[in-house]
Amino acid sequence: MKDTLLKKNAFLKIAIQKSGRLYEDSVQLLKDCGIDLKNGVNKLKTESDNFPIEVYFLRDDDIPQYVEDAVADIGIVGENIVYEKNKKVDVIEQLGFGKCRLSVAVGRNEKYNSINELNGKKIATSYPLLVNRFLMDRKVKAEIHEISGSVEIAPGIGLADAIVDLVSSGSTLFMNGLKEVETVLDSQAVLVRNRNLNGVKQQILEKLLFRIRAVRRASNNKYILLNAPNEKLKEIIGALPGMKSPTVLPLAVPGWSSVHSVLNENEFWEIIEKLKGFGAEGILVVPIEKMII
Ligand code: PRT
Ligand code: ZN
């Protein structure tokens, strides 16, 4: 009896977006974690042969509620949705995709010097909770109009003076004659968790998180190989962060060494320029598939 119970719960249910901006990256992340998903005709749910996981495909707006109710144990959803829905779930990991910001925008030709300009204005948004909190924190009194889609057209049709909506490239605002004036929230896809996972599910989640972190670390880092004149080795090694210290191997040509290291994407170009300045040659940069530390 106990055994059956254990078996029944010995997989983790993850909710991801059914279609839309987060769908592909969510499925790709699971694949990069080595999880093979069965390709069934059933687009509501699928499972894996090589990892104890069941994947539910849902509308992003519904994911926080399903995770709170334990219909799913964990979910992948934008921070914008998590904080707007305000459900009892824990955010456990930022996933680095679906990046956007929730911003206030006004007509391009409107004068805008400070947030106080929003006093007494009508603001259209699909994020009433976040906007209300944002305005209250700044002691601004404005009228919030909740609308569910095409928020960007609201000022043009006289429904509102300003909007609060998600922005990534800014082209939607531009095309609608609007300009971005304040950021309410910076958002990206995150992993959320039900607050009462049992021990077995928690263990599976730890395994999954271990893999997600290795995949994320790898995509943020590059492996670099270069040839260095020995008399400049000290400077070149000094410019490299590396996981521990860089690997240094003698080259067949006397007076030269091969140096191998790992560079973070954020500091990548700056370091490459320094290395070239110190006389590094034949710099090769290769992607890393997984990075376990
Ligand atoms: O059907 P379902 O309800 O699941 O999907 P949806 O239509 O509600 O959401 P979807 O697929 O559009 O977005 C899912 C999530 O992607 C959002 O909740 C955000 O976390 C994230 N995301 C990232 C974005 C954007 N970037 C984004 N640019 N969501 C929406 N947009 C929209 C924005 O609303 C605006 O209309 O894109 C337009 C602005 O884009 P730019 O590039 O013109 O600035
Ligand atoms: Zn949605």
Image (tube, rainbow, N blue to C red):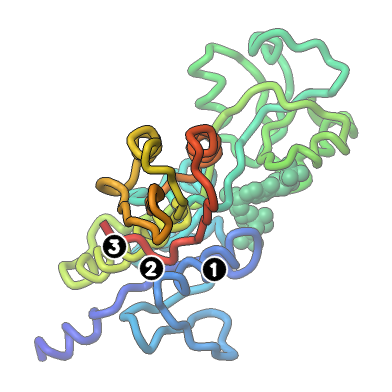
The percent coordinates of residue 191 (x first, y second) are: 40, 56
* Residue with the mark numbered 1: 58
Compared to residue 210, the image places residue 94 above or below, namely above
Which of the pair 285/175 is nearer the observer? Answer: 285
Residue topped by disc 3: 210
At label 3, the amino acid type is: Phe
Residue drawn at (37%, 37%) of the image:
231
Identify the image quadrant of the N terminus: bottom left
Q: Amino acid at mark 1?
A: Leu
Q: Which residue is drawn at the image coordinates 54% and 79% (left, top)?
A: 44
Asked where in the image residue 233 lies, by quadrant, the reply is top left
* Pointer 2 with pointer 1, Cβ within 8 A: yes
Residue 195 vs 207, above or below: the answer is above
Q: CA distance from mark 2 to mark 3?
A: 20 Å
Q: Mark 1: few, some, or many residues within 10 Å (few <14, many ≥20)?
A: some
The secondary element bearing badge 1 is classed as: strand
Please state which of residues 189 and 129 is positioned toward the viewer in this rendering: 189
Most extreme residue toward the front is: 254
160 to the left or right of 119: right
Which percent across, then down, holds residue 78?
Answer: 52, 50
What residue sits right under mark 2 in the picture? 72
Q: CA distance from mark 3 to mark 1?
A: 25 Å
Q: Helix, strand, or loop for circle 2?
A: loop
Give how far across and how far down residue 144 sits, in percent. Answer: 66, 28
Secondary element under disc 3, as helix, strand or loop, is: helix
